[in-house]
Amino acid sequence: MSAPVSEHLNSWIDREAQAEAMIPLIGKLYRENNVVTGIYGRKLVNQSAIDILKAHRFARQVDEHELPISETLPIVQALTTLDLGAASIDLARLNNKYKASGTSSLEAFLREELADVVGRRGEGRAEPRDVVLYGFGRIGRLLARIMVEHASSASGLRLRAIVVRKGKGNDLAKRASLLRRDSVHGPFAGSIRVDEQNQAIIANGTYIQVIYANAPEEVDYTAYGIQDAVVVDNTGIWRDEEGMSKHLQSKGAARVLLTAPGKGDIKNIVYGVNHSDITDEDVLLSAASCTTNAITPVVKLMQDAYGIDHGHVETVHSYTNDQNLIDNYHKGERRGRSAALNMVITETGAAKAVAKALPELSGKLSGNAIRVPTPDVSMAVLNLELEKETSKEELNTFLRKESLEGPLHSQVDYIDSTEVVSTDFVGSRAAGVVDGLATIVNGKQAILYVWYDNEFGYSAQVVRVLEHITQSEPVKYPKLG
């Protein structure tokens, strides 16, 4: 074997061995300390050695170079000696901060950086809070996946039930199968069992009661031991105060979160932008739309840094379930034509909805949408007339920095690869990902291209709102912005 070939193979074997050594340490932190480790939003808990190496490789999309596992393994080893309390720790950001600190002692750095949780041995985990999913379609099932994934972590969310209309045939098994298998997002990470006798689905140990009902007010959640629950309405049927209030007629329901734009005085919340506007009196809330969540954080960054005089948002959106698979009658304009064969011009209220989260932009943005024949991942093209001149290099540097260190780093991601296409963003937990190479700047005019997984990225935002209103957000380290 030639020297270069041997060198690369030996390097791979060494890195693989380090990833294998990391697995039990990650598991120990997770189970004994309620510590969730990750790399730029990619969780390392319950991952294979290959998945861990892929997460390290992914870091190059953010830092422009692969994250060396030789640098993160000593961090994980050190974390297991600190008897930590509940926390969410990003190893990439922690490693970057350690190297920038100039501190020679890793242990001393970690003790100072994580001082609030050192020696607390698993303490700080939020009290469990019951969550019910009303509806179990695309968003409902992804919310279920995320909450099941969080069930053993520092998060206090507990998925207790789903409410659906009973279908013909073997309804329960079919619901479980749709949770287990997904044509876009792949198989469920774990084990799913069906309890036919008690009408329940058990996913990775999470017992999910399946409740059949035709209307919200029919359900008595207390009959299933569910109390003070947050009901997440995924149906989109009831979007105003009168309709959403039907859920509060159910015993055991305390709050309602809608996964669609709310009407009237319902607060439309984009986590990271206006979630601090939520009060204890807000029992009816909306998590806005996927597109509103994708564009609002980027627009806020632009407004704060450059000012926006006016702009237009054009959304290139994957088809959704409300369109026809083949040509057939549809009450909506153009949506009756085959979604799988056509680009379909349609309306979107996302641009106007931005103003609900950012009132200073009221009347400044227009918007339209084109539905395209892809099942998931969309793009928003922001054509903005700024109040200050800039350049492509300056603007991209600003957006990349904000994606790494800013207060919206969980919402806004950044990439500048020449080869990425839409499927590369399936499973992205960011609300939106700025494609830096596509950025166009001409004086005060800036055109930004923002990718977003309109299913999974949006679901991640909904869970962030849920964690906020239930006060079950895990403490995140290192602290940024």
Image: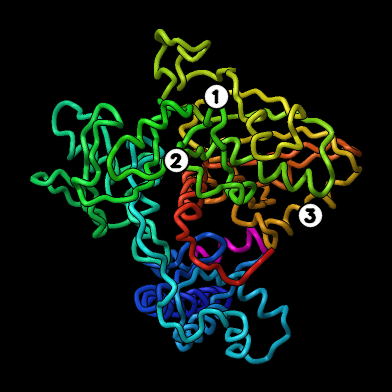
Q: Between 8 and 362, which is closer to the camera in this rendering?
A: 362
Q: Is residue 208 above or below residue 112?
A: above
Report the residue marked by disc 1: 371
Mark 1 or 3: the one toward you: 3
Q: Is residue 62 located in the magenta-colored stretch of the structure?
A: yes
Dominant secondary structure of the magenta stretch? helix
Mark 3 or 2: the one toward you: 2
Q: Earlier in the sequence, mark 1 or mark 3?
A: 1
Q: Is residue 362 above or below residue 50?
A: above
Residue plotted at (43% across, 11% down): 330
The x, y position of residue 289, in whole percent, is 54, 35
Q: Residues within 10 Å of mark 1 (few under 14, many from 20)?
A: many
Report the residue marked by disc 3: 398
The x, y position of residue 62, in whole percent, is 65, 60
Mark 1 or 2: the one toward you: 2
Taking the image as shown, residue 95 lies to the left or right of residue 200, namely right
Q: Between 255 and 286, which is closer to the camera in this rendering?
A: 255
Res. 108 image quadrant = bottom right
The x, y position of residue 199, in whole percent, is 15, 43
Name the element at disc 2: strand
The amino acid on which the numbered mark 2 sits, given as a three-letter code, is Leu
Q: Earlier in the sequence, mark 3 or mark 2?
A: 2
Residue plotted at (73% across, 41% down): 438
Name the element at disc 3: helix
Residue plotted at (77% across, 29% down): 364
The amino acid on which the numbered mark 3 sits, given as a three-letter code, is Phe
Report the residue marked by disc 2: 257
Q: Is residue 115 above or below residue 280?
A: below
Start and end of the magenta stretch? 54-64
The x, y position of residue 121, in whole percent, is 41, 82
Q: Earlier in the sequence, mark 1 or mark 2?
A: 2
Taking the image as shown, residue 90 lies to the left or right of residue 448, namely left
